[in-house]
Image (cartoon, grey):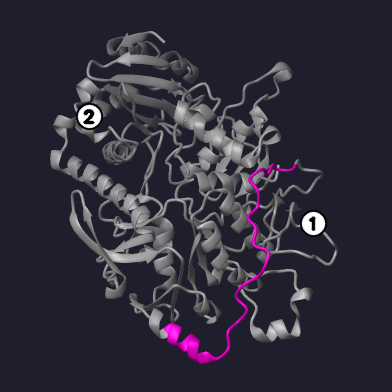
Amino acid sequence: MKMKSSQELRRLLESIDHRGYPAYKDTRGVYDFREYQLSIDHVQGDPFASPSKVSVSVAHKQAGFPAEYYDALWKKTALEDYLLRCFAKEIAQFNFKAKGSGKSGLIATSRPGQEVLERTACEITPQGITVRFEVGFPAFGRTINSGELIRILFDFLPGCVGSVLFYKNRNAGEVKRVIDLSEDQTFIRQELKRLGLVSFVANGAVLPRETGISDRPMKGSVAFLSPKSLEVTLQLPHKGALTGMAVRRGITLIVGGGYHGKSTLLKALESGVYNHIAGDGREYVITDDTAVKLRAEDGRSINNVDISLFINDLPNGRDTSCFSTADASGSTSQAAAVIEGIEAGAQAFLVDEDTSATNFMLRDDLMQRIVSRDKEPITPFIERARDLYEQAGISTVLVAGSSGAYFFIADTVVQMDSYKPCDITEQVKAACGASGSKPEITAPGFKLPGGKRKLAARTGPGSGRNHLPGGFDGGERAEEDGSQGHGSGGYGNGDRGRTGRGGRDQRIKVKVHGRDAFQVAREPVDLRFVEQLADSEQTSALAQMVRYCLEKKLLERYTVKEVVELLVKEKNRSGLPAFTDTSYRAMGLCMPRVQEIYACLNRFRG
């Protein structure tokens, strides 16, 4: 697209003032504002539709950020995240300062949470820095009010761009601290592998969150302090010596009374697969980035999964080495989650007894005496956990509060007492030795499933519609402009249907319902219990990936592992926008982990 000058844009806007709203379409294009380029990528159909998509690009020569601040992926992501947060704060001052009907005057971009994630809202490329946002083009009724848009683009925006995207206008020390933190966090992740750790929790970390709907740190909470026996000191490149608790590979048990912080610690470990911003309290809580949270998920679909490691010899003779169901029980869903986690490359499982199926986790001595093993098709997790570690290298971190059976297989036992961890491993081992009764904790026939699983085609109705959370109807259609909702991302980025012969929409529709669910081709996907999804923009990216798979017929042609590898390869080659088919470049997408891509495909009933 040929670049025009900023003055040409001003003259164009002046010429269409008070005309019908569709005349705004003529503004689409790229404009030179001397120090940066403004691109109007998509213009909304009317003032009440999803806002227009706009981007600003600054060449590295003008931006001036040191090249060593974005020469590695983790530093680049950290700098992008920092700039996006600063830009969002700047433009928020001008949100709806321009007046008009509908969404007139709206100025917004992604609103990141506490995690540092790779997003399309701000990208650093070899050419420069690009930020993407949305603007509600002003109107009175459906008549253009271009004077207000001129205020946005020529008065408000230049100051925001200048203060954020030019290094000379930023606090150099603040920028450096962002990059230094990312390097320290990456160093800890590398140390986890070298030292054989699942996780590292720094002394002084603040683990409790503000409220159930706020992920900010709780004020006045007890700071974390590691037991001396579990302490390890790391020498970080920038922060220097940092001491904290080492969660070693193997089987770790977290116990303690109710409300003493067991689940809070586990939740911090779950979230530690991502880096966090300074001031979060968990910026030095780092977990193996392949770790997967396991839980029961009544009613989920299971598609062609070999669950024979845990469930076998069903009364009806059904084969569990290639098992499918549209409505799994708690134990069956958790068994499938283990196998799917193995397939996704998990090196650690995080489990909370509160959200697990009891009959999947264990069977006590009395139950085993009354219901003999040959009458029970379920092999509980306690009998596989040791083999999972010793034969497959997969560690387990388990929160337990009602049964002591796992004490017999635990390598480390941490007791939470008023949010303070205590190492009680030796006391537990002594108690187990003196108990005189050892539960059945091993089972024969340990064999990992193969990696050649394909998703079976749906064979009939009842694919799971109307299973969306929050009352969403599985048959709900996307809006005309394809709004995916605002969630934490700040704006939608759905597909606008391309009209084919007869006026019918030829595209696969996508609609996202916050972090927890989306629809593709009117087929709902429920992700409420994929607990390590951190942001609705990750859900948006997953929805686009599923749409891409359907259009390319990948699920029919390749194994699940091959599909995920193809998706990751395409993302690395062309970025997340490669999965969209809109006429403008995708905005409001955020990269999920490989483990969440697997989880999404495994829950797609279509």
- Which residue is found at the position 63% from the left and 53% from the top? 471
Q: Mark 1 or 2 closer to N-term?
A: 2
| Observer able to see residue 514 | no
Q: In the rendered image, which quarter is residue 177 located in?
A: top left
Horizontal arrangement in the rendering, residue 436 relative to residue 324 (left or right): left
Q: Where is residue 339 in the image (x, y as percent from the top left)?
A: 62, 55
Look at the numbered discs 1 and 2 and tell me whether their residues touch, using CB distance below 8 Å: no
**For residue 469, side relative to residue 86 (left or right):** right
Q: Which quadrant holds the C terminus?
A: top right
Q: What residue type is labelled 2?
A: Ala
Q: Residue at x 54, y 40 (%)?
A: 542
Secondary structure beneath dot 2 equals helix
Quadrant into which the N terminus falls? top left
Check the image and report above or below for 557 versus 412. above
Categorize mark 2 by other alpha carbons within 10 Å: few (<14), some (14-19), many (20+): few
Which label sits on residue 421? Answer: none
Q: Label 1: which residue?
A: 319
Q: Which of marks 1 and 2 is in front?
A: 1
Question: Magenta residues, as a range?
Answer: 428-456
In depth, the one of 28 and 99 nearer the eye is: 28
Q: Residue 67 carries which label?
A: 2
Q: In this view, does 24 lie above or below 396?
A: above
Asked if the magenta segment contains residue 344, the reply would be no
Nearer to the camera, 150 or 485: 485
x and y percent of residue 14 in the render?
34, 13
Identify residue type, mark 1: Asp
Extreme-right residue of the structure:
316
User: Residue placed at 39% from the left, 73% from the top?
Assistant: 261
- Image-based side of 145 in relation to 47, left or right: left
